[in-house]
Image (cartoon, grey):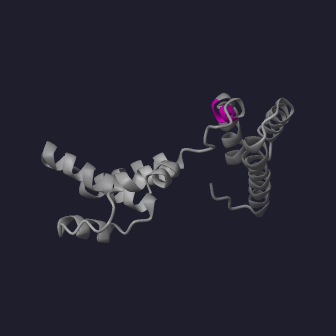
């Protein structure tokens, strides 16, 4: 949404600021120490924010669409352990979609499997902060100086297991 009218830009920035404030409260305060009063206050703030009319038609339409999904969006208030977004999953899938858009498709089922495997390794290495080039070079050259991605995931998810082993 890219407003052309300066007043619409102001309305959009005002709404974004209010939304970021709400997300910040949800992330910082509520997730750390959830209480019934906090939950009710956040519901009320969400309802207030997503009931406003700005006069910027595109923004007002987006506000209504978002308000209609409030039960899904506010699930984090019932279950504070849920992440506030699924960006990690979305980003992982996006790489595959971009690749498919550029190359159209693979010619064989084996090609599809190889492509999916390659992209999974690349995205996993990226999330773990491992150089994709160095990882592939390590494996293709059969040096095996770098730990496996599975080992890195295990250590990242369960660091206490790594400490117990060492």
Examine the rendered structure and indicate whether residue 75 appears above or below residue 53. above
Secondary structure that dominates the magenta span: helix
Which quadrant is the N terminus positioned in? bottom right
Q: Is residue 66 rendered to the left or right of residue 43?
A: left
Number of disc labels: 0
Q: Quadrant of residue 143?
A: bottom left
Q: Tell me the residue at 24%/70% (across/down).
A: 137
Examine the rendered structure and indicate whether residue 139 appears above or below residue 40. below
Instruction: Measuring from the top left, give residue 52's x and y in whole percent.
Output: 81, 40
> Does 20 appear in magenta?
no
Instruction: Measuring from the top left, give residue 100's x and y in whole percent.
Output: 29, 52
Instruction: Measuring from the top left, give residue 106's x and y in whole percent.
Output: 18, 50
Could one spot residue 101 in this view of the protein?
Answer: no
Q: Tell me the residue at 77%/51% (across/down).
A: 15
Q: Tell me the residue at 80%/41% (across/down).
A: 49
- Magenta residue span: 72-76
Examine the rendered structure and indicate whether residue 101 appears above or below residue 45. below
Which quadrant is the C terminus positioned in? bottom left
Q: Quadrant of residue 80?
A: top right
Instruction: Measuring from the top left, give residue 61's x and y in whole percent.
Output: 68, 40
Q: Is residue 58 rendered to the left or right of residue 124?
A: right
Examine the rendered structure and indicate whether residue 80 appears above or below residue 21. above
Q: Tell me the residue at 83%/29% (across/down).
A: 36
Question: 85 or 128, which lies in front?
Answer: 128
Question: 62 or 139, which lies in front?
Answer: 139
Could one spot residue 82 in this view of the protein?
Answer: yes
């Amino acid at each position: 949404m890219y407003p052309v009218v300066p007043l619409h830009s102001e309305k959009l920035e005002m709404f974004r600021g209010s939304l970021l404030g709400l997300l910040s409260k949800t992330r910082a305060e509520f997730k750390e120490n959830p209480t019934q009063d906090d939950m009710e206050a956040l519901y009320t703030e969400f309802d207030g924010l997503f009931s406003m009319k700005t006069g910027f038609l595109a923004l007002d339409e987006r506000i209504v669409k978002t308000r209609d999904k409030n039960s899904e969006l506010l699930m984090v208030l019932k279950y504070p352990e849920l992440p506030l977004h699924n960006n990690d999953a979305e980003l992982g899938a996006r790489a595959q979609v971009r690749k498919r858009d550029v190359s159209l498709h693979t010619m064989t089922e084996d090609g599809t499997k190889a492509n999916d495997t390659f992209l999974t390794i690349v995205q996993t290495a990226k999330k773990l902060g491992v150089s994709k080039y160095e990882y592939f070079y390590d494996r293709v050259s059969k040096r095996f100086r770098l730990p496996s991605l599975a080992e890195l995931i295990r250590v990242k998810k369960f660091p206490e297991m790594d400490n117990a082993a060492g």
